[in-house]
Image (cartoon, rainbow, N blue to C red):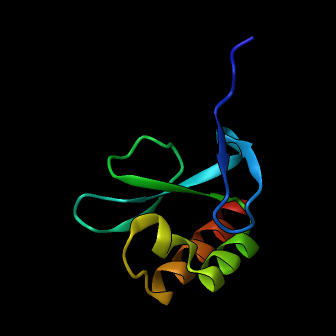
Amino acid sequence: MKKQPVRTCIGCGTERTKKELIRIVRTPEGQILADPGGRMNGRGAYLCRDPECVRKAWKTKGLDRAFRETVTRDVYERLEKELIDSAD
């Protein structure tokens, strides 16, 4: 049996397998996007597929720390909307 990589959600802090989380990536151009395939170039951070974790990450400035730059509220709102739309 192959070992599954484990990652930590920056919103709630829960450790889960990589497949259970969604990767958020800062591209070399500076864009912050959801990366459902997990293969885009750039620095990555992981969130649960729950919009509540996006809210927690905003409150604790999780993406700011992960990407070492200020992330605007618009980015968090867009990510939250994408997670809600993908859940439906």
Looking at the image, is 26 positioned above or below residue 75?
above
Residue farthest to the bottom, as pictured: 73
Q: Quadrant of residue 46?
A: bottom right
Residue 33 x %, y % = 43, 64
Q: Residue at x 48, y 71 (%)?
A: 65
Q: Residue at 48% of width from left, 64% of height from top?
A: 66
Q: Between residues 85 and 73, which one lies in front from this camera angle?
A: 73
Picture quarter containing residue 4? top right
Residue at 70 percent of width and 59 percent of height: 49
Residue 32 sits above or below residue 36 on the image: below
Question: Where's residue 12, x and y in %?
Answer: 75, 66
**Vertical relation: 64 (above or below) 6:** below
In-image side of 43 versus 6 (left or right): left
Residue extending farthest to the top is 1
What residue is drawn where x is 47% and y is 75%?
A: 64
Q: Nearer the viewer, residue 10 or 41?
A: 10
- Residue 85, position as x, y percentages in the image: 65, 68
Quarter of the picture containing the N terminus is: top right
